[in-house]
Image (cartoon, rainbow, N blue to C red):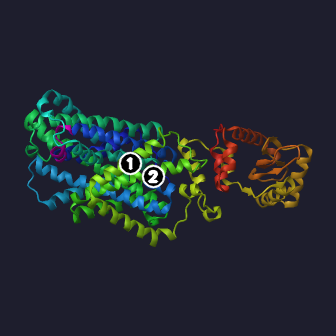
Amino acid sequence: MPLKRELGFLHVFAMAAGAMISSGLFVLPAVAFAMVGAGLPYCYLLAAVMLLPAVLTKAELITAMPKAGGTYFFIDRSLGPGFGTVGGVVAWASLAFKSAFALVGIGALGALAWHWNISSWQVKAIACAFCLFFAALNMLGAKHAGRAQILLVAVLLVILTAYGAAGVRAVQPTHMRPLLPHGWSSLLMVVGMVFISFGGVTKVATMGEEVHELKRDLLGGMFAACIVVGLLYALVVYVTVGVLPEEPAEWWPIPLAQAAGVMFSTKGVWVLAMAGLFAFLTTGNAGVLAASRILMAMSQDQLVPAGLGRIHPRRGTPTRAILFTAAFMVSIILLLELETFIKAASTMMLLLFIFEMISLVLMRESHIPTYRPTWKCPFYPWLQIGGSVCYTFLLVELGTFPLAVAGLIICAAVLWYVFYAKVHVLRESALIRLAGRIARWDFADHDLEAELSRMARERKEELTDRFDSLIQDCPVLDLEGGVTREEAFEVIAQALSDQIGYPSAGVLKLLTDRETLSSTVVRPGLAIPHLIFEGLESFQIMLVRSKEGVIFSEDAPPVHIVFVIAANPEERNFYLRALVAIAEIAQDPGFDDRWLATGGPEALREVVLSAERRRDK
């Protein structure tokens, strides 16, 4: 059962913005300022610019493969199920770690800003309660979670915008000098730290199956969130640096609340603390939604147990994946000191960005005919090369311990693939296509071209008509080698006989007689043999391809595309509509090239279904 398409632009914007505005804005500036000084706002701006390669790369992959799972799905279909398993586990764990860390921040924020007298275990209990609340909210439906996210993000953005606008006038110019007291090396190090603050924007890739329109809602919401949050980050941090003391030791752990206190007294502290609370809530909510979709997608691909991929028939949500994700988050909240693991989550995110760059290159260079994104990343491949270099540099800056923790998680994912997933799945990838080492019969249960084509049709949200229904169920023949017309008709007659319950010899005679009366080759490379006879119970279509060509006549080019039609005389009207549909399909630019270049029978069927034509309502 598919997920419900019930999310719009505001839902996507709120999920992306809420995932970005969290500890990176409310906690991290205090640490980063001690390292870089007054140049901190420029670190945030530079980090936002460095995010562009990842965002633009993911935007193209989303429009080509709008599936739940996002990053996992892109890596799996480009690099194969082995890398897909690793990428899925890493993406899921990274989201769970970062979201759990945000929820723990709720109790910590209350203790610092509102002077709650609570223990560390009470902080964790608060985080667990909110985790279970968001799990229940997500199980009710993505739309309910999206509405809550819109409300929280709206309040958060209003507070931060007002803080920035009012605070510009309170900035002390002397606080902004010297710009880089610790040198340029400190700038680069802090960019690596604050870059993680923006990584949440790409969580929305997991919502590809649940948005109404990809370009308007998903890409529009993601790009808008990047621009708005990037500028807001720089403005808010600029005000904070310009208002607070020049000595880092005098900064609170939550510097925005401290700056608001300087400008607006105690009420300002409370309001900004409330904004911090909303920020942590939005990150937790977005994390539960995004992480559960990754787990669901992996389950549907048989990389984890099938039960985790089941979708509630009424609510349209992956209930079990949500529950499992929430249980994992509760476990790490209770058992681990999450501060240690936040850098590991950031390391994993950077690794995923690099994998996505590789994924896009593989999808493009494998020349899969049905890989047809509706939006293409500019400056290919230089953007991907530059992005990979930048992200590798940031990985080095994060240190060896986070890499070691991420390495342990990757090793666990590899072991899971070797001992569980590998025996359950055999799937074609763009890497195999690019290497040219695929034996088509090995992948009879999965065809990447056909899957991409199906996603393209679902992406368009077109109505299917009777012709589409016939194509979806019709037999497809892929003839080997060059054959004569008589040889092709014998194979077609046998296959069609099984469909209509008519002797193959009789079908062969009808085909031959019709061809003798007048050629059914309607244009170079395309033939439409057709049978009209009484007693046929249902309209039948058959697709036939011959890469080397069927010789219908010594005076004409070989025929590579054959649509065989069998109809009752009473179906004359639909027969004419079917001929019109075939003509429109054959005129679709690039149809012949896709027909010859595509893979096996299922991919051929999808090439026909995805061709541009008018459909009957």
Image-based side of 101 in relation to 468, left or right: left
Residue range of the region highlighted in magenta in the rendering: 31-39
- Circle 1 residue: 389
Q: Is residue 602 magenta?
A: no
First-in-chain label (1 vs 2): 2
Q: Which amino acid does label 1 sit on?
A: Val
Please, is residue 494 above or below residue 571 in the view?
below
Q: Where is residue 450 in the image (x, y as percent from the top left)?
A: 60, 53
Q: Where is residue 114 in the image (x, y as percent from the top left)?
A: 10, 47
Residue at 28% over, 40% down: 153
Image-based side of 66 in relation to 257, left or right: right
Residue 180's image quarter?
Answer: top left
Q: In the structure shown, which secondary structural element does the residue marked by tag 2 occupy?
A: loop
Measured in 3D between alpha carbons, the distance from the residue under mark 1 to the one under mark 2, in whole angstroms, is 28 Å
Image-based side of 173 in relation to 547, left or right: left
Q: In the structure shown, which secondary structural element does the residue marked by tag 1 occupy?
A: helix
Q: Does the magenta stretch include residue 37?
A: yes
Image-based side of 614 in relation to 417, left or right: right
How crowded is the residue under tag 2: few (<14 C-alpha within 10 Å), some, or many (20+)? many
Residue sitting at the far bottom: 419
Residue at 64% over, 42% down: 611
The front one of 53 and 333 is 53
The front one of 573 and 342 is 342
- Circle 2 residue: 68
Between label 1 and label 2, give the one nearer the viewer: 1
Please, is residue 359 above or below residue 241 in the view?
below
Q: Is the magenta stretch mostly helix, strand or loop?
A: helix
Q: Which amino acid does label 2 sit on?
A: Ala
Please, is residue 360 above or below residue 419 in the view?
above
Can the viewer see residue 339 in this picture? yes
